[in-house]
Amino acid sequence: MNPVQWIWQNGKLKAWQDATVHIGAHALHYGSSVFEGVRVYATARGSRFFRLRDHTDRLCLSAKVYDLQLPYSADAIDRACAEVVAANGLASAYVRPIAYRAGFTFSLAPSRDVPVEFAIVAIEWGAMHGAQAIEQGVDVCVSSWNRAAPNTYPAGVKAGGNYLSSQLIAQEAVRGGYAEGIALAPDGNLSEGAGENLFIVRGSKLYTPPVGCGILAGITRDSVLTLAREAGIDVVEQVLPREFLYFADEVFMTGTAAEITPVRSVDRKPVGNGKPGAVTRALQKASYGLFDGSTMDKHGWLTPVQSASAAREAA
C-alpha cells in the first residue's frame, strides 16, 4: 500500500508508482544526492511548516558543495513542498525534498551535462522512535562506529552518502536492543546520534558538541539552542568526552524526525533518575508550544501550508 497518492517530481505531481528513477542513475551508484526533512504540524491555526525556508536554504548549500545544479529556485522549492502536502490532503506531514544526479555515468567527477532531478515526498509520520519515546525516553548505546574525520566528507552537508554511516550506527544499536546509537568523533569525543544531535544537562548548564565534532548542524538543534537561551539556560557548545553521558543529569536528542527525544539510559546506565528531567521537559514544552499556540512564534518559524500553496498558484 502506498503511503500517499502523490509525489512531486521534476515540476509536476505524479502518482506514487510513477515517480521513478533509472537504474543507471549516478545517485544510486555513488550517493550523489542531497535532501532535507521538514515537518508540517497541525496547529490551531491550520497546517504549518516548521522552518521551511531554513531547510530549503540548507538544501541549496548542500547542493553547492557537491556541485549539483538545482533546477529550481528556493521559492519554487518551498511552493512545491506546499503543493505536495496539499495534494495529499495532509494536515501534518514529514516532507522530504531531494535533489539527485539522475543521469548515467560511472565517473566520480561527473560533468554538468549529467542531469540533476528533483523530487518531494510528503507522508504522515509521527514521532521517530514512537509516541512513548517523547514521554518516557529511550535507551541508547555508544556505537562502535565513529563519525568520519572533517576532511573525509563534509558532515555539515545533508547528503545521501553520509547516511551510510548513520545506517551502521542505527543497525548496530537496534541489534543490541537499543533505540538509537551515539557516535564518537574521530578523536574519541562525543559527536551525535545516527540521525539526531545530542544535548546533555549537567548541573545548571546545557551542553552540546560543536559543529567541529563531525555533526550536522541541525535546524532543530538551532531551535533548541535559541529557546534555551531565551529561557535563561546557560548553553555551552564545547568538545565533550564520552563520560559526560554517564555524569549527566539529563540527556536528550534532537532532529526534525526525532523532535526532542529524552534519553533515559546510556549503555544500560540510567541517566539521572531514569526519567526525562526538568530542562528536557521545559524545552519540549517551549518547542511544542509553537504548535498549540502556548509559545509565541516570534522568530517567524511557522509557515502556513495554505499560503505557500496559494503563492504557487499566483506565480
Image (cartoon, rainbow, N blue to C red):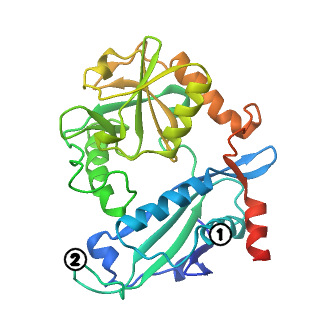
Estimate the spatial distance between the alpha carbons at disc 2 and disc 1, rounded to whole Å: 33 Å
Q: Residue at x 61, y 50 (%)?
A: 51
Q: Is residue 241 left or right of residue 103?
A: left
Mark on residue 108? 2
Nearer to me, 194 or 65: 65
Numbered disc 1: secondary structure: helix
Q: Position of residue 180 (x, y in %)?
A: 36, 39
Mark on residue 84? 1
Q: Residue at x 24, y 49 (%)?
A: 150
Res 255 visible: yes
Q: Position of residue 184 (x, y in %)?
A: 24, 37
Nearer to me, 130 or 54: 54
Nearer to me, 191 or 85: 191
Nearer to me, 62 or 129: 62
The quadrant in which residue 75 appears is bottom right
Q: Residue at x 41, y 13 (%)?
A: 272
Mark on residue 182? none
Q: Hey, what amino acid is under mark 2?
A: Leu
The quadrant in which residue 212 appears is top left
Could you tell me if the residues under marks 2 and 1 are in contact, i.e. CB atoms within 8 Å? no
Numbered disc 2: secondary structure: loop
Nearer-N-terminus badge (2/1): 1
Report the label total: 2
Q: Hey, what amino acid is under mark 1?
A: Val
Looking at the rendered image, the quarter that the C terminus falls into is bottom right
